[in-house]
Amino acid sequence: MSSCDLCDLHGSGEAHRKYDINRHSHWILRHHPDPSPLADWLLLDARRHMGGPLEFTSEESSTWGAVGQQASRLVQQLTGCDRVYAIAFGEGARHLHLIPRFGSEPASEAWKVVDLYRAVTAGSQPAAKTEAVAQFVERARQAHLAFAP
């Protein structure tokens, strides 16, 4: 298998864990790496390399729903958003994006958030400020101490 950027981010070094919020036996809840489209954009990653739910083990399947729900509740708790989009897209690094949706913010609406993602990746829109991301990660770590082991 060739190198996987996502698996590389799950490494053991401190630099790899700067965005980690919590590690479950099968899942890693972390912030989107730089450049992040929003200061409160989280990812729920499988700890092992896989292509998505079609490849879940029975143990992964049995925890997926509860962990995804806990992580989504965390996003809503910390942001006060109206909804949390759970989106899986992309071929390079397959994981679940947990994106806050604010009814009062048109840029967070459905496909517009994907356009924001593309614009930030292309450099035509500014990424979330590093300080705001670090603050959100710290708040998420403190609020999510009860994350399932």
Image: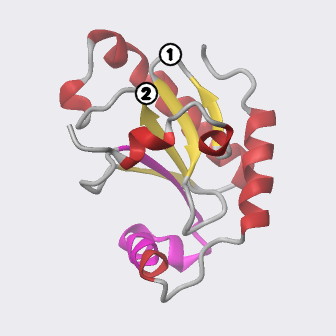
- Residue at 42% over, 81% down: 122
- Residue at 79% over, 64% down: 131
**Magenta stretch bounds:** 95-118
Q: What's the CA distance linking mark 2 and mark 1?
A: 8 Å
- Left or right: where 103 falls relative to 74: left
Q: Nearer the viewer, residue 122 or 89?
A: 122
- Left or right: where 66 falls relative to 82: left
Q: Is the residue 127 above or below the residue 53 in the image?
A: below
What percent of the width, then of the height, locates residue 127?
A: 60, 75
Circles 2 and 1 in contact, beta carbons < 8 Å: yes
The amino acid type found where label 1 is placed reads Ser
Q: Nearer the viewer, residue 39 or 108?
A: 39
- Residue at 65% over, 71% down: 128
Residue carrying label 1: 25
Asked if residue 116 is among those painted magenta in the image, a careful observer would answer yes
Quadrant hosting residue 64: top left
Tell me the quadrant of the picture where the C terminus can be found. Answer: top right
Tell me the quadrant of the picture where the N terminus can be found. Answer: top left
- Residue at 43% over, 27% down: 47
Mark 1 crowd level (few <14, some 14–19, many ≥20, 10 Å Cα)? few
What percent of the width, then of the height, locates residue 31?
A: 59, 49
